[in-house]
Image: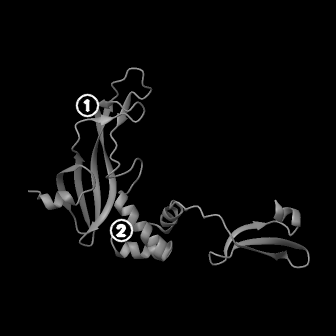
Amino acid sequence: MITEPLLSLLPGKLSIDRIAVDSGLVTVHARSCNLTACCPVCALPSGRIHSGYIRHVADLPLMGRIVSLSLQIRRFRCPHSGCPRRIFAERLPAAAPFRKRRTVRLAEVQRSLALGAGGEPGSRLAALLAMPVSGDTLLRLIRAVPVEPAPPARVIGIDDWAWRRGKRYGTLIVDLERDNQPIDLLPDRQAETVAA
């Protein structure tokens, strides 16, 4: 029997069919609790099931074991006759975003590991924590973090530097109020380039 606290551990509105436990892997077989799904093109809800398939998504570890969600995804027929999408699969953005192989919460933890440890060291640490991921994937998670736009600089510093000493020089512009944060690198040291 599946208890209520275990159901609260799952992301999104999912119901558990069964749980399979192997030596190092916990597989949770689940499905959506919703009776209908909305078409991603025309946004009309549909309850007409066409077919289904199984989608495997990695989730946070449980007691030192790797967790895999085996989600029963249903395909629906779109009710709108003019919609170009005749058949669509239900989407579970709270559990697993579209075309992603990991849950949102696992991606957040792995991104935090990547930001703290980097690519390969973060990969080794994640493997010890039962969240295996490659170093390249961790670097992709870092690159996906949105960068906040910097406020306009009030006090700037300008200095030239050598691309090749005695031959070619460039100009560096830094924000002096934000710990000498570089703003731009200019290809030469001409006054017209700096003014532009």
Q: Identify the mark at residue 191; answer none if there is no mark.
A: none
Label 2 crowding class (10 Å Cα cut-off): few <14, some 14-19, many 20+? Answer: many
Q: Identify the mark at residue 47; answer none if there is no mark.
A: 1
Residue 103's x, y, as percent? 35, 57
Pointer 2 or 1: first along the chain: 1
Q: Amino acid at mark 1?
A: Gly
Q: Amino acid at mark 2?
A: Met
Question: How many numbered tags mark residues here?
Answer: 2
Q: Quadrant of residue 10?
A: bottom left
In screen coordinates, is 186 left or right of 54? right
Q: Identify the mark at residue 131; answer none if there is no mark.
A: 2
Element type where label 2 sits in the image: loop
Q: Quadrant of residue 28?
A: bottom left
Residue 95's x, y, as percent? 31, 52
In screen coordinates, is 156 left or right of 102? right
Above-or-below relation of 89 to 184: above
Q: Residue at x 82, y 75 (%)?
A: 160
Element type where label 1 sits in the image: loop
Q: Residue at x 60, y 64 (%)?
A: 150
